[in-house]
Amino acid sequence: MTSEKGSSVSGEPVPQLNATSRVLDERRRAALQEVDNAKFSWFHVKVCFVAGVGFFTDAYDIFAINIASTMLGYVYASNHKSLSTNAGLGVKVATPVGTLVGQLLFGWLADVIGRKKMYGFELMIIIFATFAQALSANGPAVTIIGVLVVWRFLMGIGIGGDYPLSAVISSEFANTRTRGRLMTAVFAFQGWGQLAAAVISVITVAAYRDSIIKDVSPNFNAVDHCWRILIGMGCVPGVIALYFRLTIPETPRFTMDIERNIQQASRDIEGMLSLKETNDLGPEKVNAPVASWADFGAYFGQWKNMKVLIGTAYSWFALDIAFYGLGLNSSIILEAIGFGSAVSTGSQGVYDNLMNISVGNVILSIAGLIPGYWVSFFLIDSWGRKPIQLMGFIVLTALFIIMGFGYDVLKATKAGRDGFTFLYCLANFFQNFGPNVTTFVIPGEVYPTRYRSTAHGISAATGKLGAIVAQVGFAQLANIHGTNAFVGHILEIFALFMLTGIFSTLLIPESKGKSLEELSEE
């Protein structure tokens, strides 16, 4: 396998390119320069919404279980209060486990088969598995929790596929000047998805209020309707977006560098910039490196490339320890500090608790999550990815130290609880105005085309490993010495991981203002 300079990845000399190859290489550079210098157009808006709606659906489906698990506890737990530790862990961790598998699988397939051919297939998995969850029920041989765990694992595979595919498609279609903002806008749909899950929960619980509290004893059948509607609504945006995903064109970089068809890629670029359909053309092969396991080992066997993969992967791992540790347990943390706790008992208490949890998640989304995404959006192409990630990890380290070591003091008084809630919102803000955005953007930029999706999938999967560790750790540690008594120490552990994220960020190059070819040295 050769590079354009006439040397292999391993450094061994190879024959120089012939005259035809040089001409094709010049055409490749010129064609990609058109993409890099293109003005922001409606095509870019379409890419943003088609890719972004996937993250909206992903976030809705992932974080709706944070509220739905409380509803499931009321309906299916033997005490009609809360799921057992293992049952609650199962329904929450099944999706991250599936996501890890999907990120590795679809990341590799997108580099081998193509971005376009895989795009939309992962959304079909999400739609089907989400709808199936809403129809799940108990049976003689298996409980509803077991059924939900299976469907949420399968849904997670589809969600996992969305990460590398959407990141790579948006980065490969974007121009250099606004690439960071386009990718951030795509990822920012995640915040709207989390907010939508909380809002749908508020609306659903309010709609069933009279049914829940019509008697002294709660009507758990009404609560059963609530969680099914909440989960089932997650497939609606996916159904709307499916057609557009199936019809999005292949990225020019994949066509040039993997299929090695410069003529078709050039026509696709013309069609992209003019928003016209193009017909498939016969091959006119450019001399581009070919992906293989040997080449993969040779490329990442070089420290300059391996350290970048370590940096993007571990940074995502460290971030997701806290991001999912908080995101999937925000209801528990809000209850633990007494925020909006129900003062009533019986059926009114069930309604109040569900409404307080739903409203609390709305507040967290509006006050911290969504603003953080959009501050990143406005600054990522001017300030840069690496400074934002470093700043985020530093601030998060400080915030988790304060919340963790001051936990008992803060929750002792109303003023302290209000202060904790404010710090909690700040942590959500600086996760998104910080490493949650940049750990998604950077792996979609810094790797060569032939491994861009695979390496993004590896980085994202490492992040989901962090989410799994966080969720299992939270479930097993939170109740040491009493119900939610260990939460403060868990926040201290989060602080340690944020500190390590500072050092892994130092391994990552700055990608602001550089073309994808400059970053990957293609």
Image (spheres, rainbow, N blue to C red):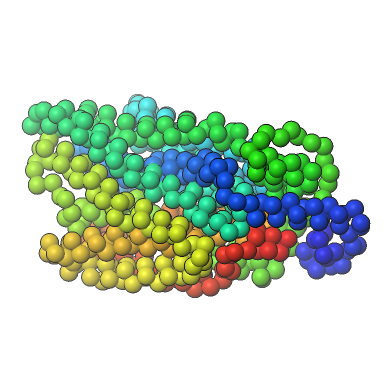
Residue lying at 62% horizontally and 48% vertically, measured from the top left: 173
Residue lying at 57% horizontally and 64% vertically, measured from the top left: 512
Q: Is 390 placed left or right of 226 in the picture?
A: right
Viewer-proximal residue among 412 and 355: 355
Question: In the picture shown, does residue 288 fall above or below 261?
Answer: below
Question: In the picture shown, does residue 474 fall above or below 241?
Answer: below
Q: Is 485 placed left or right of 163 in the picture?
A: left
Q: Quadrant of the N terminus?
A: bottom right
Q: Quadrant of the C terminus?
A: bottom right
Q: Is 512 placed left or right of 26 in the picture?
A: left
**Res 356 quadrant in image:** top left
Residue lying at 29% horizontally and 55% vertically, measured from the top left: 367
Question: In the picture shown, does residue 510 fall above or below 162?
Answer: below
Q: Position of residue 452 (x, y in %)?
A: 64, 54
Is residue 328 among the parts visible in the rendering? Answer: yes
Viewer-proximal residue among 374 and 487: 374
Q: Position of residue 358 (x, y in %)?
A: 25, 44
**Res 227 quadrant in image:** top left
Is residue 130 among the parts visible in the rendering? Answer: no
Question: In the picture shown, does residue 150 fall above or below 430?
Answer: above
Q: Position of residue 433 (x, y in %)?
A: 41, 61
Q: Position of residue 338 (x, y in %)?
A: 16, 55
Numbered circles on residues, count: 0
Viewer-proximal residue among 463 and 364: 364
